[in-house]
Image (cartoon, rainbow, N blue to C red):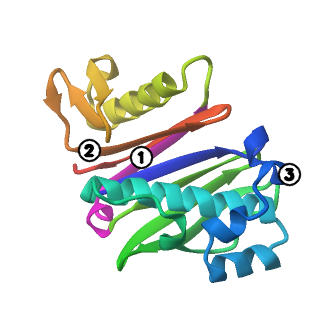
Amino acid sequence: MSIGNDIVDLADPETRHQGLHPRFDERVFGPSERALLGRSDSPHVLRWALWAAKESAFKAEKRLDPAVVFSPKRFVVTLSALPVAGGQGVALGQVVHRGHVLDLQVHVDGTRLHAVARGTRAMGARLLWRVDRVVSDAGATARRLAATAIGAALGLDPSGIRIVRRPPVAIHRGRPLEVDVSLSHHGRFAAFACALVR
């Protein structure tokens, strides 16, 4: 199976348009994506939704093939309409990379967006995801979110679940669990997504 996720804090200084390299869009997005940005009423939200979609798809593809490199233009995103800036909702779409099609969800919640991409083999699996504010350690926050949600879904004590390695693996009392896990963090937020086999 393959799953990936990416979180973007839309209020973080590095997401401001003024802070971007003048050729950022040209380097990262293909012609169809740049055309969407040119027509968008909310280019700030769309830009980062497309970016997060590409990042999440890269993480999913990297699980299947460790040799995959992140070349953003090679991850082609199609996406339904996003909520307007400051709005909430979900946009659905796909990411295509070297002939592989990944299912895509982008959850927009005012000041953040969270993209989850999963390959066809993960489509029958149960999808879990969560986003939370980072208090001190972003990585620890993402691992805690994952352990808590996986424990609840599988009826296991979350304190016995550890998320280790890269790509992340969920282990319960020394045994790997049959879940695909993806962690992410940016700015004030941390997130995870996973696909449960059972």
Which residue corresponds to mark 2? Answer: 179
What's the CA distance linking mark 1 and mark 3? 35 Å
Front residue of this view, candidates 88 and 61: 61
Q: Is residue 4 left or right of residue 28?
A: left
Front residue of this view, candidates 99 and 142: 99
Residue 82: tell me if it is visible. no
Identity of the amino acid at label 3? Gln
Front residue of this view, candidates 198 and 8: 8
For marks 1 and 3, the one nearer the N-term is 3
Contact between labelled residues 2 and 3, with CB atoms less than 8 Å apart: no
Badge 3 density bin: few <14, some 14–19, many ≥20, Cα 10 Å:
few
| Residues rendered magenta in the picture | 120-132
User: Picture quarter containing residue 170?
Assistant: top left
For marks 3 and 2, the one nearer the N-term is 3
Contact between labelled residues 3 and 1, with CB atoms less than 8 Å apart: no
Which residue corresponds to mark 3? Answer: 18
Query: Where 152 sits versus 3, above or below?
Result: above
Q: In this view, does 78 lie to the left or right of 175?
A: right
